[in-house]
Amino acid sequence: MNSIKAIKKKLNLTYRDLEKQTGLSAMYICYLAEGKRTNPSLEVMQKISSALGKKVEEVFKLN
C-alpha cells in the first residue's frame, strides 16, 4: 500500500511529471499507485518519494 496517488493529486502532478523527475515510466508509477505492481526496490521508492517531496516512510507503508 502506498500514498502515491493521494500525494500526487494534492501536489497537482501527473504521472508524466513524475516520470520526468524520476526517470521511471509513467505506466510503472501508475501501476504502483494503483496496487497493480508491488514490492518496488528501495531505489524506486526513494526516487518517487523525492519527486513528491516526502520521506519514503510517508509514501510507502514499510513493514
Image: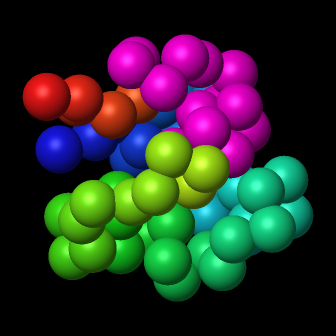
Residue 40 image point, x, y percent: 39, 60
Q: Is residue 7 above or below residue 25?
A: above
Which residues are drawn in magenta? 45-58
User: Residue 52: which quarter of the image?
Assistant: top right
Q: Nearer the viewer, residue 63 or 48?
A: 63
Residue 51: within the magenta?
A: yes
Can you give x and y, in whole percent of width and height, for residue 17 in the image?
Answer: 77, 58
Residue 33 x, y percent position in the rendering: 35, 57
- Left or right: residue 45 versus residue 31 is right
For image coordinates 69% across by 21% down, the residue present is: 53
Residue 28 position within the rendered picture, expressed as x and y whole percent measured from the top left: 49, 77
Say if the magenta span includes residue 32: no
Would you place residue 38 above or below residue 49 in this image? below
Question: Residue visible at 23% across and 29% down?
Answer: 62
Residue 20 appearing in the image: yes
User: Which residue is at 48% across, 26% downward?
Assistant: 56
Q: What residue is drawn where x is 42% and y is 43%?
A: 4
User: Which of these two is toward me, 45 or 28?
Assistant: 45
Q: Quadrant of residue 36?
A: bottom left
